[in-house]
Amino acid sequence: MYEAFFGLREAPFTLTPNTHFFLKSETHRQGLEMLQVALANREGFIKVSGEVGTGKTLLCRKLLNALGDEYVTAYIPNPHFSAETLYCVLADELGASLKRDKPNPIYSHIDGYLNQDVTTEKHVLALRQINDCLIRYADEGKQVVLIIDEAQAMPEETIEALRLLTNLETESQKLLQVVLFGQPELDRMLAQKHLRQLQQRITFQHRISAFSRADIERYISHRVILAGYQGGRLFDARAITLLTRASGGIPRLVNILCHKALMAAYGQGSSVVQAKHMKAAVKDTESVPRPLLNWLPWQFAATVFAVVVWAQAPVELWL
């Protein structure tokens, strides 16, 4: 709608987690580096958490794109299903068939363990096929990584099934690494006493933090340049101040508000997004906390002056 007016090739603030627009902000850079180092060292469980809209899925996709040919990845974007389904989905992701044509000697070392923790034959067959695939990939010198997004949606029985998967190993190495991406609810869930076995296996973790004002300025500049913008400052300072207060530094909310503010500026024929355009965007977005938009600078200065005068007044005037 407004792309041609501002000299853009594409919309810079879509909600799709497009890795083309990935910005290595401090918090996302630290997260990506932690993930790559932990996977390279073959750590078992790795966790990344953050509030809704902080860019977990984008970081997840960036990681998937960054892993080389030595990795085999299985990606589960929505794990809200049973333990049995988890095994079947993973087996399918690894290219395994749930049909077992003949006995395989590699199954003997897990049969007794399975009988204690897995209650159905379908569980047994799926886990055996997963184990078969993992051993095959290990023989080929490949690392298998299971990446689960929205991990806080997993039922507790599925989390326990996930822990059991990491028991599949050779004498020298784990056969499966697991990366969990989730909201803060995941942290609280894993902190429960009966899930402490899995919590103890998480060797590396990172919490994605919200953007500061400086981060937001860099984020906006990064996105509009990648979208083809070649002009001067597109968002004025007051607009960014309002944006920072209204969004709380959450990238998804930054995208929503910037998109609406650009629409408002375009509608008024303004080549720069001003505070009034951002104010209109905030008022039009119910999910965004309302900043004190009507708190004008002169009102703030008057209040500060009154407080200073009051603080310096003689004590008897207070009584």
Image (spheres, rainbow, N blue to C red):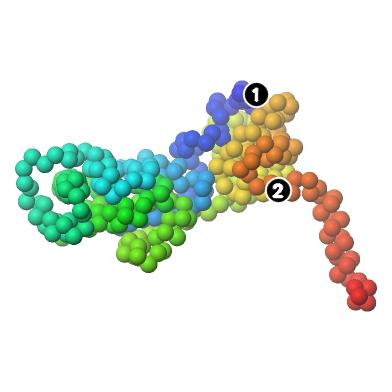
Measured in 3D between alpha carbons, the distance from the residue under mark 1 to the one under mark 2, in whole angstroms, is 29 Å
Disc 2 marks which residue?
Answer: 291
Badge 2: residue crowd in 10 Å (few <14, some 14–19, many ≥20): some
Residue 70 at least partly seen: no
310 or 24, nearer to the observer: 310
Query: At label 2, which amino acid type do we have?
Result: Pro
Rendered position, 242 above or below 260: below
Q: Residue 192 at what x, y percent from top left?
A: 40, 64
Rendered position, 294 above or below 189: above
188 or 39, nearer to the observer: 188
- Contact (Cβ within 8 Å) of mark 1 with mark 2: no
Quarter that holds the C terminus = bottom right
Disc 1 marks which residue?
Answer: 5
Left or right side of 295 for 47: left
Q: Residue 195 at what x, y percent from top left?
A: 35, 63
Residue at 59% in and 42% down = 253
Residue at 54% in and 34% down = 14
Instruction: State which quadrant residue 97 falls in.
Output: top left
172 or 228, nearer to the observer: 172
Query: At label 1, which amino acid type do we have?
Result: Phe
Left or right side of 13 for 29: left
Label 2: which secondary element: loop
Residue at 61% in and 50% down = 248
Whichever of callouts 1 and 2 sits on the residue coming sooner in the sequence is 1
Q: Residue 167 at what x, y percent from top left?
A: 22, 58
Quarter that holds the N terminus = top right
Left or right side of 26 for 202: left
Label 1: which secondary element: helix
